[in-house]
Image (cartoon, rainbow, N blue to C red):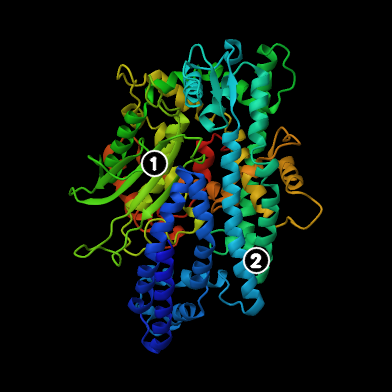
Amino acid sequence: MTKILDELEENFAQLETKVASAGAELTWTTLVEPLEKLNDPLEQTWGVVNHLKAVQDSEELRNAHAKIQPRVVELTQKMSSSKIIYGGYKQLRDGAAWGAFEKWQQRAIERAVKEAELSGVGLEGTAKTRFVEIQSRLSELSTNFSNNVLDSTKSFKKLLTNKADVEGLPATSRDLAASTAKANGHDNASADDGPWMFTLDYPSYIGVMQHAKKRSLREEVYRARIQIASSGEQDNTPIIGEILKLRKERASLLGYANHGEVSLAEKMATLDDANSFLEDLRARSFSAAERDQEEVQALADQHGDNVGKLQHWDISFWAERLRESKFDLKDEELRPYFPLPSVIKGLFGLAKFLFDITIKPVEGSFEKWNKDVQYFEIFNSESIPIASFYLDPYSRPEEKRGGAWMSGVVDRSSTLARPGAKVRLPVAHMVCNGTPPTDKKPSLMTHREVETLFHEFGHALQHMLTTQDSTLVSGINGIEWDAVELPSQFMENWCYHEKTVMNLAKHYETGEPLPKAMFDKLVAARTFRAGTAMLRQLHFAMTDLALHTTYDPSGSDSIYDLEKKVSEKTCIIPPLDENRFLCGFRHIFAGGYSAGYYSYKWAEVLSADAFGAFEEVGLEDEVKVKEMGKRFKDTVLSLGGGLEPAKVFEQFRNRGPTTDALLRHNGLLQG
């Protein structure tokens, strides 16, 4: 890293000198392409470091990361706010040759100008010095936040030895708990006899919350989960406070009222758009969420042995009983039909059908960070390789952060092609935290885990099937952040398409396909508690926007006071006073979603409407569906950031988006 940073600093200074002396002769090939070449070694190498930190965290890596991070931030800030490079981009934008640039080049230039302005290029003296200090400190705080979440999550371990304590837990949960116990020194642990160890990692946590009959166990695990990274040395509360203050100060230096305005300066929506959009969805879903809660309470009253008013740790348990009673469907009955190898085969079959690509595992040895990592190559219809990707599918709470994500290893680029090649092919990371295999069984996925895999694959497809040849606009680069979830959420819809599900749902022991009756129940249950699910996401999004627009981090109200105020509009049951969910909200404090979490719902409108195009031609009409798949590939998956997302959508759909499909898919369309 030190060598790369030294070379980059020297080469960037030389480029600045060339640009400054170029005068009116400055062109795309003398400004933009050299910058692309300069940036690539740092982006690749630092990208690997950050990837390893997310999937294979260790004390040694943390220390090395902390040592080099300030230099990375300092240099990237220096480059992004270079007045010479900024002036060069403005010269291209305002020059006589502007009309000769292709549309994607104009987009890239305009975006570069905007990014420079948001990076403080216009600041001077003490304001510029302070801006750089803020950038460096925010980067450090983000890393500390993420470290605390990981450490706090893995510090909770609940060991049980009494069979009565695990009553109600299905074999999959007990199997996972026994495997965790074994990994922690209990060599004789077994699914049937224990001991069993539970963690706050999602596959372990959700098993307890949905199935454990022991109410006190559910309460203990729930309270631990909502207080992750909120006490002692791992308390993220002061970190959040400092992050919010610094973001607000940075916005002020740039001439904006708050961080929300800065964030939305590069998005599709305006602040008013985002707020009114969220409120509209909230109003449409609140009464449905109230009915959801009444149904669960009624079932608990009927069968719960005087359980009384349901508490937070009761909701998932009784909601799962309600789902079982309404649809005669249990997640544990579905799991055997979703072994990971079969799901992957079915997913790749769908990609072949829709987008005419073939995906093959890479045989032989390849570099990987964990024994379970798989590597695949993608070929086009002419059997020519066009991309490749890594898949890291399983939860590893000791070293791997929670959630699921896609990230680029390298972007498609003609400028960065190897000698003799026309273009450098894209490579992606796909990371999930699914249920790991055990000694006796392969990874048996819940349907929700299947959806998550499809979701991340949608992101990867946009990264890999791009036809843009510049890193500035290839894949997801240059796409407004509130549109990047379109292909990922689009892919989730196929998890409810009969032929797709039947092709991937094969019993891990017998190979038998999922019974049609079970599939019908799965589809029928799709909108189960949709109002509750919608409100949950709206709560996150509205809290995020409020924290970054109306909240005063120097005022008397705490961040928890603000969240509680938002919850009055978004929660049927008020959060507990000790709820510290914000301390684990990585998306906005250690990710790219600050003042942008609304993007999930914003893009879901686009994705649902896009899938509506397939529904309209008839999902069983394979010829028309394949035609629509090609159209989706040639627009949404191909055009990257080279065209405004709204125009890309219009090219695909021949009109702008509507919310009808989203509300229909969620069972919330009125009238």
- Identify the residue position indicated by label 1 in the image: 616
The quadrant in which residue 226 appears is top right
Left or right for 385, reference 34: left
Amino acid type at mark 2: Ala
Say what secondary structure mark 2 lies in: helix
Cα–Cα span, label 2 and label 1: 45 Å
In this view of the protein, which residue sits in the foreground, 44 or 420?
44
The percent position of residue 562, horizontal first and vertical second, equals 74, 47
Q: Earlier in the sequence, mark 2 or mark 1?
A: 2
| Residue at the far right in the pictured view | 556
Residue under the point 38% across and 32% down: 497
Amino acid type at mark 1: Glu
Left or right for 31, reference 122: left
The percent position of residue 172, horizontal first and vertical second, equals 47, 20
Q: In the rendering, which numbered label is found on residue 251?
A: 2
The quadrant in which residue 341 appears is top left
Left or right for 566, reference 136: right
Q: Where's the N terminus, which quadrant? A: bottom left
Q: Are the residues at dot 2 and dot 1 in contact (C-beta closer than 8 Å)?
A: no
Label 1 crowd bin: few (<14), some (14–19), many (20+), radius 10 Å = few
Residue 493 seen by the camera: no
Residue under the point 41% across and 18% down: 517
The percent position of residue 224, horizontal first and vertical second, equals 65, 32
Label 2 crowd bin: few (<14), some (14–19), many (20+), radius 10 Å = many
Say what secondary structure mark 1 lies in: helix
Residue under the point 35% across and 79% down: 30
In this view of the protein, which residue sits in the foreground, 482 or 178?
178
Up the image or down, 324 lies above or below 232; here it is above
Residue 668 seen by the camera: yes
